[in-house]
Amino acid sequence: MTSDSFLRALADGVLVLDGGLSNQLEAAGHDLSDELWSARLLAEEPEAIVAAHRAYYAAGADVAITASYQATFEGFARRGIGREEAGELIASSVELARRAAGGFDRPLWVAASVGPYGAMLADGSEYRGRYGLGEAELYAFHRPRLEVLAGAAPDAFALETVPDADEARALVRAVRGLGVPAWLSYSVDGASTRAGQPLEEAFAVASEADEVVAVGVNCCAPADVEPAVRIAARVTGKPVVVYPNSGEEWDAGARAWAGRSTFAPEQVTGWRDAGARLVGGCCRVGPGAVAGIATALER
């Protein structure tokens, strides 16, 4: 597939996103407890990533989000992996998702995941933002990885789990000129980003950016989705992307999820009716739930 076909499909209707890559890998028996999280398997067990993507495509997902969320030059360097090899591993995330799409008889797309600066820190900062860095420093962090991912020719960038409108500004600037459309999705708490900015202000960051073709929320509680969809559609006029987590809470100290799931696939019809055009799940939302989303959306 190509970016052009992805954009045409987005204009024509609702696309189903995949679910949480990490929980699918863990369900297959892989230990993701270290700081690289699922990105560790890019080097050690890439076929496991292919299998996880295939499970979501088979469940009805139209778009797979790559295993590059926590794949950064800095994170790999802490593991003794040099810059050249790190770049190859980051780019391989797109190729693995492409390989997983082979053999299906319908159009499928790949979105290259670009996690926030806090994901590299691996200390829960992606749920807080406000790292003490300026926009220029955040741009310098994100741009090299985006260039590598663009070279691997994904259909889109997923600028995801962004906790802070300041980091969103850096990301919007960093995708310019790369020739890959992007969606921008915040991690939110009610009607604010995790850093506390009103969503009206946060979504406005992308309203005039032609490279950003959809805006929305991910890795948030399902209850926060529908109000955010309505705000995003009103502020930007762009298609809206939504993929909440299960409703459980991440304990960064224990590196584990706690609480109970509040995600139900039948909720997605309300999100679609409010303006969502890219709909899926994030952490703890597996292939069964994605199949339910596809069924609810009559895909």
Image (cartoon, rainbow, N blue to C red):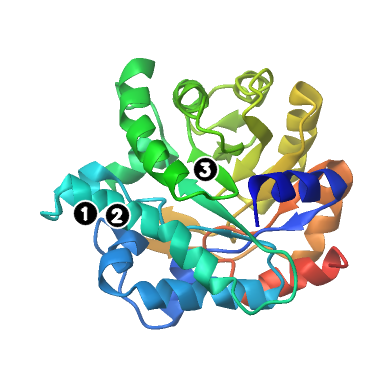
Quadrant of res 287 = bottom right
Q: Are marks 1 and 2 in contact (CB under 8 Å)?
A: yes
Mark 1 = which residue? 85
Category of crowding for the residue at label 1, using alpha-carbon neighbours closer than 10 angstroms: few (below 14), some (14–19), many (at least 20): some
Residue 254 visible (yes or no): no
Name the residue type under label 2. Glu
Task: State left or right for residue 53 relative to residue 79.
Answer: right
Mark 2 = which residue? 88
Q: Position of residue 31 (x, y in %)?
A: 30, 74
Q: Which mark is residue 160?
A: 3
Name the residue type under label 1. Glu
Q: Which mark is residue 53?
A: none
Q: Position of residue 147 (x, y in %)?
A: 40, 37
Please name the residue shown 75% across and 38% down the image.
229
Please name the residue shown 65% across and 57% down the image.
1
Label 3 or label 1, whichever lies nearer to me, is 1
Label 2 or label 3, whichever lies nearer to me, is 2
For marks 1 and 2, give the CA distance: 5 Å
